[in-house]
Amino acid sequence: MATVYFDEATRRFSKDDAPAVDGITLDIADGEFLVLVGPSGCGKSTTLRMLAGLEPVDGGRILVDGHDQKGVRARDRDIAMVFQSYALYPNMTAAQNMAFALDNAKVSKAETRQRVAEAARILELEPLLDRKPGQMSGGQRQRVAMGRAIVRNPKVFCMDEPLSNLDAKLRVSTRSQIAGLQRRLGITTVYVTHDQVEAMTMGHRVAVLRDGRLQQVDTPERLYDSPVNTFVASFIGSPAITLVESEVREGVAHVHGVPVPLDRAVAGKAGEKAVIGLRPESWHVVASPTSGSNGSAVALNVELVESLGSESFVYGRPAGAGEEAGRVTVRLDKRTHLTVGDVVHVEPNRGEVHVFDASTGDRIEA
Amino acid sequence: MSTPAIVGTLDDETTTTPRSRRRRRDDAHGAEAGTHHRGPVWTVLGYAGMVLVVLLVAVPLFWILITSFKERGDIYVRPAQWWPEPATGENYHELTTRIPFFDYVRNSVIITSATSVAKIVLGVLSAYALSLLRFPGRGVVFLVVIAALMVPNQITVISNYALVAQLGWRNTFQGIIIPLAGVAFGTFLMRNQFLNLPGEIIEAARLDGAGPMKLLWRVVLPMSWPTLVAFALITVVNEWNEYLWPFLMSDDETTAPLPVGLTFLQNNDGVTNWGPVMAGTVLAMLPILVLFLFLQRQMIKGLTAGAVKS
Amino acid sequence: MNEFSRRGFLGLAGAAGVAGLSACAGTGTAPSSGAGGGSSNTIEFWSNHPGNSKPVEQQIIKAFEAANSGLRVKLVDAGKNYEEVAQKFNASLAGGQLPDVVVVSDVTWFNFALNKQLAPLDDLLSAAKIDTSDYVDALYNDYNLDEKHYALPFSRSTPLFYYNKDLWKAAGLEDRGPKDWDEFLTWAPKLKAAAGSDTIVMELPDGSNYLDWVFQNIVWGYGGAYSKEWTPTFSDPNTVKAGAYLQDLAKKGFLKLSKDPAPDFTAGIVGCSMMSTGSLGGVTKDAKFAVGTAFLPGDGNCPTGGAGVGIPASLSDERKKNALKFIEFLTNAQNTVTFTQATGYMPVRKSAVELPEEKAFLEKNPNAKTAIDQLPKTRSQDNVRVLLPGGGARIGKALDQIVQGQDVGTVFKALDAESQQVFDSQIKSKLGA
């Protein structure tokens, strides 16, 4: 168990290109489950591999338990990793796979046996112990890979998209298993995924990366409720937030013609233009164009309806707006039924708007 | 990979689930159905082709075998005798008495095993260093090795001869073995094999605390088994048949291997009695044949070991 | 853990690299006089044991060691044929550890002599008071370059005309070889008629297997030659005539070329052939019909062949003296009889045929007598075949083309030009030095 501290850590694959990981500073507490999330190519896997010692650190430092890891070999870091491909040793049985690291660390035979048995019990691998990876299903291999990490009782777990090769259903159940396991073992974990649902459901805190730069590190709730910029706002949440560039006049933003009053301090900082962000659940339906609280509402031409049973999401374009205007996404409860081609009138919920600077995309706080 | 032929060799792997067995059998049925679709003409042509190839390979071997049991006068007769009548062991007797056959066998075994072991060990180690270990100048070393591969051995023979002769190693085993132990081919082959291994498994082993030797022995080599066996087989066959260098180095039966020794059965200015030559060929072939049959099983086993799903 | 450090590992890799390099390393310093080890009283004899002669070589060596206490002879397996001995000798010239006595064939000796790698023997011979006049003249003079002799004849052979007596009888021919090649042409249809359809009248070795050696007989028979001294004479009308004769035989279906005619002849599917005297023992042993031998057609048109023994030039005088002592012993009348009776080669000494055991032997082996009787009618081969680098192979290739039906004049003209060019570029400057 350990703390991990990234101090301006940087990785450059070549001198001419922009760094793959650009000055990331990140403080991970002992026992914390931190998720690194971002679109592909954002540097999240590289960040993880730097921690594991599989990539050099070209600038800055990485500390584990306060010790700089520079020059410490991967095999001496006491960090276990679960790979996307699982990377099991094909010539060894499940039991041998799990025992390999202990064998290397000169752990006694008896203790090895006991720790492997314990891991197998936790992961329900007992019937598979004598099988080789070639004779196992994807889910079984994934569990062996997990087992290989946990028998070591390492300082840090690194997990690199360990669920992405599983089918959707198995992914959901394994997700909670891993989260539960981590809670039980209390081992500091850094988990990489491109899937924001995984990030939101598993992590104590989530770090969002873009182009090698850290955007925001926060609890899932805070990320959702107070994204620091339009990138984080649109990356987190599904369906995505609706961002509308709007004019701001006298403390009121005009979203598709509908006046939305802003907090006075926020409006003061916004200037004449701002990007207004509205989550799908931040809208409500009104009966007619004029029945909104301000006597106006956005008329949407429904282009797509996703019905999930308990609720549905409607994607529509404001009537009269050109093609360049973005779609608006609205969540509806199951009592409202719409079909493609309908026109629906919606109005933003008061106090649920996110305001971002029109030029930088940064969040404007009071 | 799940061809029916390979399933047949898996009798010791009882853990294959019944379900996957059934699926494999279904595949096999599918394959058979496929050939039926092609029509009888193609099937017959296919078999005819296979028979032709078998004959091309087998007839000369068969001829060597029966000739080795023929009496001298029966070797050149018309029509050709397809069965030794009468059969005689005389050729084998002459083979072992006219030349010191067993000395040559002993030398061949010594030279082949020593050279093969050296080549395989050096090839694996150098390929491992050049593919999976990072050190400065790695690219240059690899280039030099490849360059060594490009130099035909006929060119190096003379300078090697000079070197070995100056060391006073002519007609000694070390004089024959050490210059043959160069490994450019093995380095090249095994390096490519190692580079094609899934990188994440190597990384996983490093994170699991495996040192270089353990990584090689427990992870890298087991995954490279088929290539290694193929490399070993090629090496052994090559060394067993190696002629030019042992011929230059050896002076007599204290060091000369079989390929050199057997030539002394041939009359180089006159009529060769081919019976003993064929007998010698048969006996020289046997060990390699046995080794090949044995290693071939290993190769197929290696292929079915099951790699990681990528 | 037991630390097998990366550095230690790199050491190993380095070692592997060094071993890899050893495959192409090594430089030979030119052997200085007497270099290359070898004590002066051990004589290394590099032989390919021509005609499976290893046992008889050992027998002669034993007799030599008994007669010369203090001298030992080490018999070395130096190759399976003359070319391999030359190759091995070449390697030793680059790297030391030279033999004392080496077998050199009619084709390989010249290049070694030209490059001063073989010692001229004349001074050594006169110093040792060895009478060379007893050597068969044609054989002795085969090793002559600029009035110096670079080897002494050892395992010498000539071609013989072999024929199947049974077939001869069936065709109603006299039991003898043809007087000349024109006569053979009149015999050929009779032989063909008498033989079954699957029997070939005459089979000769192909161009890669010394057709150029036996063909010299036909060329000389028609008054042509491969060369006069060093001037190629393939375009000479008589030479062309011989080429046309060969082509004619093939066209009419009387002639077939093969890698080795001996098996076919022994199997009885070939009527006649020209093959080395060295084949005599094997052919008579294996054939299930009466084998006849005769002089090659014509008179004095029989080329010599086979090999002699020479001494490397850079040996110390002491070693040269001992080497010559051994060579003299190896080729003296007694031993040349011993050797040739065991192998089928020709005795190289004139006095050999006077020895009682040789007389008895010839009595019993009339075919062997044919070869001996032919010996005075032998003629040294033309320079462009035996002395020009690659000469035999070059002529053989041209003869193959002729048998395949290409125009004789054109092929021979090209051969003239090519041979001249090789002579100009490789030999001319080294001659007359």
Image (cartoon, coloured by chain):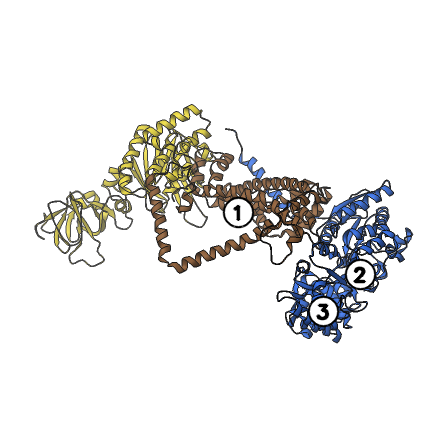
Chain colours: A yellow, B brown, C blue
Q: CA distance from mark 3 to mark 1?
A: 68 Å
Task: Report whether mark 3 lies on the same chain as mark 1.
Answer: no
- Residue A136 percent across, percent down from the top left: 35, 38
Which quadrant of the view contains residue B12?
A: top left
The residue at which mark 1 appears reads as: B189
Q: Is residue A258 visible?
A: yes
Q: CA distance from mark 1 to mark 2?
A: 60 Å
The chain containing the residue under callout 3 comes to C
Q: Nearer the viewer, mark 3 or mark 2?
A: 3
User: Left or right: B79 with respect to C138?
Assistant: left
Q: Which quarter of the figure is the C terminus of chain C placed in?
A: bottom right
The chain containing the residue under callout 1 comes to B
SS assignment at label 1? helix
The residue at which mark 2 appears reads as: C370
- Residue A232 percent across, percent down from the top left: 28, 44
The chain containing the residue under callout 2 comes to C
SS assignment at label 3? loop
Q: Is residue C231 visible?
A: no
The residue at which mark 3 appears reads as: C172
For the point 34% across and 35% down, which residue is it? Answer: A143
- In the rendered structure, which amino acid carries the disc numbered 2? Thr
Q: Which class describes the residues within 10 Å of circle 2: few (<14), some (14-19), or many (20+)?
A: some
- In the rendered structure, which amino acid carries the disc numbered 3? Gly
- In the rendered structure, which amino acid carries the disc numbered 1? Leu
For the point 71% across and 47% down, which residue is it? Answer: B162
Which quadrant of the view contains residue A7?
A: top left
